[in-house]
Amino acid sequence: MRAVVVPCHGGPEVLELREVPDPRPAPADVLVAVEAIGVNYHDALARSGALAAEPPFIAGVEAAGTVLETGTEVTDLVPGQRIVWPFTEGSYAELAAIPARWGVPVPDEVSSEQAAALVAQGLTAHYLSFDTYAVRPGDDVLVHAAAGGVGRLLVQLATHRGGRVIATTSSDAKADFVRDAGAAEVVGYENLPAKIRELTGGKGVEVVYDGVGAATFEASLAAVARRGHLVCYGATSGPVPPFEIRRLSRAGSPYLSRPSLIDYVVSRADLLARADQVFELAARGVIQVPVTGRFGLDEAQTAQQLLDDRTRVGKLIIFPQGVPQTATETATALAAEAR
């Protein structure tokens, strides 16, 4: 089969499209014909060496496809069934053998492309806004990097739950993209605490969802209300440096969380229940993930370069069997609209 391999750590240029042996499912695995692959910052972090993955390895952790074969221990997935998975290495490939525990059945009304675009970031935005801090009607909510995949979903979900979202972005084009998702206010990162205090009558926000990390942590801490909640769920700018915990008592006694999706889908039942809610919200139009970039396996370098540049809004999808023509036309129109 063809697969995109990371032979060594580095930039997008290290990615290689290779012929590799077909995978075989272990007893608790399923073998899947991959149809659509979600491109994520996790992929870039693994490629660059920021994560524990040691080369060589097949890139990617999120995809959707059709089950071809099941291992002897698998009882709840069957050949011919479409599934999607949020974190299984080896997804940039024509075939993938994944643990059945992570295979989520895809509803008939959801395409494989939509499932691959939604599952990892949708699950993340859902647990953050429904559980880590459950947004309440009237809450002021600050969402950093709101034009990103998780950020835009957080804007939609927090607004759906009755919050007033203040979003940060780095450009006018991204600001329009975020307003379209429901943000009440969109601001830049400069002098952010002062802007937040002005927009909230001096009190600050009830919750900050910060997936940026080092570059925004101090501003986030200064923007959160007394006994508010600062949720640091990612670190695209690098990890937050160590700090003295007593600082929290001088900052209004906020709660500080560093959650991870894995702890909110501990059992398969947890995963399926949360995924069902995400797909149901998508079916109702509460959350939408516009796909603005579609690529073949041989264009993985280009896809990850766009990810590294952080200039493209919307989701990037890789198609192992080639990009459908209608999908290409749709992506071109969406990208032009976003610009």
Image (cartoon, rainbow, N blue to C red):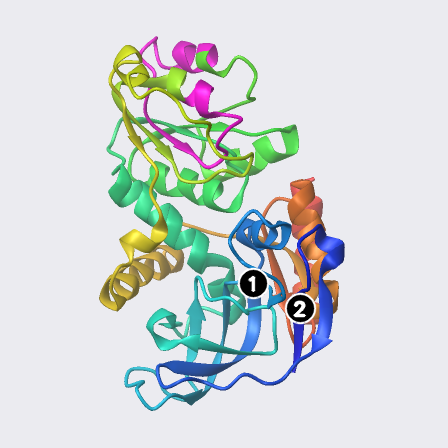
How many circles with numbers are drawn on the protein?
A: 2
Where does residue 116 sit, x and y in percent of width and height? 50, 64
Disc nearer the start of the sequence (1/2): 2
Please tell me whether residue 72 is drawn above or below residue 184 in the rendered image: below
Disc marking residue 4: 2
> Which image quadrant for residue 323?
bottom right
> Which image quadrant for residue 27?
bottom left
**How far is disc 1 from disc 2 in space, using C-alphas?**
9 Å
337 is within the stretch colored magenta: no
Near mark 1 (Cα within 10 A), the count class, few <14, some 14-19 or many ≥20, is: many
Please tell me whether residue 20 is drawn above or below residue 293 in the rendered image: below
Amino acid at circle 1: Gly
Question: What residue is disc 1 on?
Answer: 60
Where does residue 236 sit, x and y in percent of width and height? 54, 39
Where does residue 120 sit, x and y in percent of width and height? 44, 56
Q: Pick the residue in front: 105 or 162.
A: 105
209 is within the stretch colored magenta: yes
Q: Is residue 121 left or right of residue 28?
A: right
Residue at the far front in the pictured view: 54
Disc 1 secondary structure class: loop
Q: Which image quarter is the N terminus in?
A: bottom right
Where does residue 66 sit, x and y in percent of width and height? 48, 81
Range of magenta residues: 194-220
Q: Is residue 291 left or right of residue 133?
A: right
Near mark 2 (Cα within 10 A), the count class, few <14, some 14-19 or many ≥20, is: many
Which residue is found at the position 29% from the left and 10% from the top?
250
